[in-house]
Amino acid sequence: MKNAPGTSGLILEEPLLWEKGKKGRNGMSVPQSDVPSAPLPEELTGEAVNFPDLSEVDVVRHYTRLSQWNYGVDTGMYPLGSCTMKYNPKINEKQAASPAIGMAHPLLDEQHCQGTLQLIHDLERYLAAITGMDAVSTQPAAGAHGELAGMLIMSAYHDFKKSKRNKIIIPDTAHGTNPASAALCGLKPVGVKSGKRGILEVEDVARLMDDETAGIMMTNPNTLGLFEENIKEIAALVHEKGGLVYADGANMNAIMGIVDLKRCGVDILHLNLHKTFSTPHGGGGPGAGPVCVVEELEKFLPAPRVVHDGGRYRLDTDQPHSIGRIHGFFGNFGVLVRAYSYIMSMGAENLKKASQYAVLNACYLKVCIKGSLHLAYNRPCMHEVVFSDKLQQEYKVSTLDIAKRLMDCGYHPPTVYFPLVVSGAIMIEPTESECLEDLDCFVEVIKNIATEARENPELLKNSPQRFKVKRLDETRAARNPRLRG
Ligand SMILES: *Cc1c(COP(=O)(O)O)cnc(C)c1O
């Protein structure tokens, strides 16, 4: 493995700032005071305010060292399936931080924020064009929040039609947030198993769809990284029984500008701008989960809507059928700016290309790795591919051991043990950002780990070796967290 990034082990120990500080050290110098001195109020002195005294270099090294304990998409490959941890071009960060945008106050009146309103208005149009849907609201703050908005829209539609429906069909390949969002709207999730090919079969949905069912919530591509090929037939039968089709579009990275979801029969869709459209989301920061609908459902979208009339942009609150406001002001505006900048800087053709590369990269890994790890579904995959530890079981090596060994080789582990439909799942998503050489290196590392599993299983069981902390007792860590030191 001459090319593997590996780890050198040069990760320095770092105490807490309080352990490091020494009375009298100082990180700054201030000019001589030319006013009389006065004592600080009591509450700002003494034991209660126990700030450590540190020099400038103490502080710089402390935070630099802590930053080096971390691994992110700017450090190396992050093959985390179902979550699209892709590299986000820095230009989009720069745009979001530009003073004209970063300093815009959400309470400015319309006349003074025409540019920000136009940005939201145009972004909605672009997202509609990319997905094939008719109308969009950027208010929801996350994927699950977009699902909630979508489910509220589905309920509002059935209420409007005076049709009483209390169930919703959700496949076993759905993201865990789907049944939770449906349940919050009073819809009882009814599970449906995906078929042998890892996708939904028409008959299985037909058996469940009735006139008490509000519709279906599908993820396409689904969480196995497979395209739901029967989506059109399924949508037709759901529509025939008066239901609506919700698609979870958090995995849009595979199909941007390629699949027209409206033509697939989708009525409501949410996107994760913080997965597909250039907002980093590893640290749990702000996100955006725009909800997109077909024309018939536009009147139910969250209010206010940004409209353009008489040559001006304005917020329209006169939306009598709307599900109402679901976020303060305009949603997470900074995330919208990054998405807008990403779409504008890529252009239609390159967005399509990004998806094509994302799929090509996943298919390449599928073909190269399938002899080393068991491939769960030997079919064309989309942006991610699911393997398992089936081939390693005879050496008593598990998915967890493989993931931990990958860390010693310099990679963030992929998603493991998800989706639940594959026992011991190892779900890999390279994204479009990795070049051929880096993919080849990853393949080499996996092949090597498969050999180690055969020849030296103990090594894998005791991985990671090169880290500050070795194999953790994950159950104890969760039940008895030690949060200091
Ligand atoms: C990530 C994800 C979600 C949830 O998105 P959040 O922004 O974390 O709420 C929903 N569905 C799918 C398929 C996802 O991958």
Image: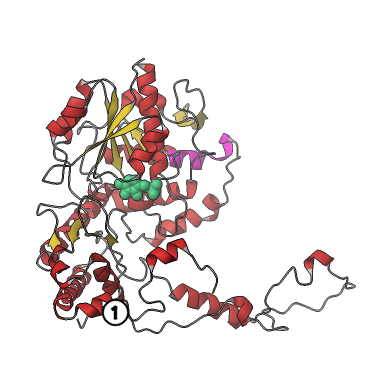
Residue 104 in view: yes
> Can you give x and y, in whole percent of width and height, for residue 250 in the image?
31, 46
Q: Is residue 457 above or below residue 374?
A: below
Residue 21 image-quadrant placement: bottom right
Q: Is residue 37 above or below residue 212?
A: below
Q: Is residue 16 above or below residue 339?
A: below
- Residue at left 19%, top 34%? 264
- Residue at left 38%, top 25%? 155
Quarter of the image for the C terminus: give it: bottom right
- Residue 128 falls inside the magenta stretch: no
Instruction: Looking at this view, name the residue that lies furthest to the right.
Output: 36
- Residue at left 51%, top 31%? 315
Residue 245 in view: no
Residue 460 image-quadrant placement: bottom left
Residue 417 image-quadrant placement: bottom left
Q: Which color scheme does this rendered protein use?
A: secondary structure
Q: Is mark 1 within 8 Å of ligand 1?
A: no
Residue placed most toward the observer, 104 or 205? 205
> Can you give x and y, in whole percent of width and height, for residue 282 in the image?
40, 59
> Can you give x and y, in whole percent of width and height, for residue 111 in the image?
57, 35
Three-letter residue code for mark 1: Gly
Majority SS type along the magenta span: helix
> Can you give x and y, in whole percent of width and height, for residue 116 in the image?
50, 42
Quarter of the image for the N terminus: give it: bottom left
Label 1 secondary element: loop
Q: How many marks?
A: 1
Residue placed most toward the observer, 352 or 293? 293
Query: Where is mark 1, residue-wise?
Result: 6
Please report the bounds of the magenta region as a residue range. Answer: 110-120
267 horizontally vs 19: left or right: left
Q: Is residue 340 above or below residue 212?
A: below
- Residue 115 falls inside the magenta stretch: yes
